[in-house]
Image (cartoon, grey):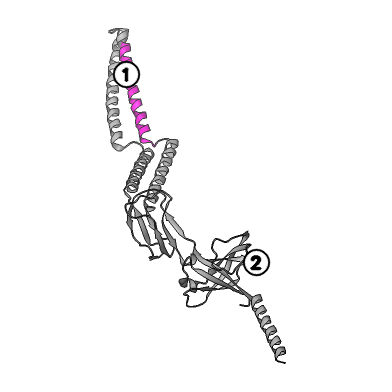
Amino acid sequence: MIKKKLVVFLCYLFLLLGCKDSSSFVLSGYTYGEFTYLSFPFSGEVKELFVSKGQTVNRGQKLMHLADFPAENALRIAQEEVRAEEAMLHNLETGERESALKVIYAQLEKAKSAASLARRQFNRQQRLYTEEMISTAEWERAKEEYVQKKAQVKELLYQLEAKALPARQAEINNQKSRVESAKLQRDKARWDLQQRTLFAPQNATVYDILYQPGERPAAGKPVMSLLSPESIKVRFYVPENRLGELNSGTKLKIYCDGCSKTLSAHINYISSQAEFSPPVIYSTQRRETLLFMAEAIPVKEDLPYIKTGQPVNIEVVFNE
């Protein structure tokens, strides 16, 4: 009778264990961070560093600054170029300056006076020629002098009219394009000056500082790395025979050394390609050779408990 009860008890125990295995299983994994690497779009000397390694920074906070003399100088040159091109456009649109027009007015008065004198001289020579008191050559000379003086008056009148008018529309349009081009160069120079200061793109922790004041990083080379809490994830490997039980959104329980409570997460990615040996294996009991990498995102309130590179155990519970 006792043996019969013992057999029944063992069967019941095996059934319980079987139910537990079918509803959950534990995997090994580790935490890692997706770092944000910051760099400058051009090379230059690091002039000032505003943060230290491990410091928590807020979005928009100043982090690092490059020496800005070259950029400031380029901006001043670009601003002067804009002013010069705008002055040229104003000159083309408004015509000659008043002082220059006054010079032509004075020349015109002088030419009119000379033409009037030449006309009187010609009339006098005309009477003398009619009375046959002068030669034909003298009369023709007086006539040509009068014609030239009248032509000078007309020339100055036309000149005055042309100088008072704005330039041709084609010239004005061309100068407008030059003004716009100069403004674009000025805006680029201003942008270059702004880019010499590095700001935090998000709330994060300064994970590493790669360059110190006095050093000259190359353009595009990372100078600092940040790690935001939302960028910490859990990576683990799923055996091929359990892959069909998981999908994006599956909830997990995370166990880690030193954690005061069980952490929660959900799967956000499962690789479509199998791996034969994962890069990190923390469990010596696992013997699977065909594994699929998966990633999980911890819930926001559990992020402070997680550090990068931390080994963890992941329990998949399907009845929650």
Q: CA distance from mark 1 to mark 2?
A: 110 Å
Closest to the observer: 104 or 247? 247
Q: Please tell me in which quadrant of the rendered image residue 163 appears.
A: top left
- Magenta stretch bounds: 139-166
Q: Is residue 304 left or right of residue 45?
A: right
Does residue 243 sit above or below 215 in this rendering? below
Closest to the observer: 123 or 266? 266
Q: Please tell me in which quadrant of the rendered image residue 223 appears.
A: bottom left
**SS class, disc 1:** helix
Residue type for callout 1: Tyr
Q: Residue at x 29, y 19 (%)?
A: 118
Q: Position of residue 305 (x, y in %)?
A: 46, 72
Q: Could you tell which of marks 1 and 2 lies nearer the N-terminus?
A: 1
Visible residue check, residue 77: yes
Q: Which residue is mark 1?
A: 146
Looking at the image, is mark 1 or mark 2 nearer the viewer?
2
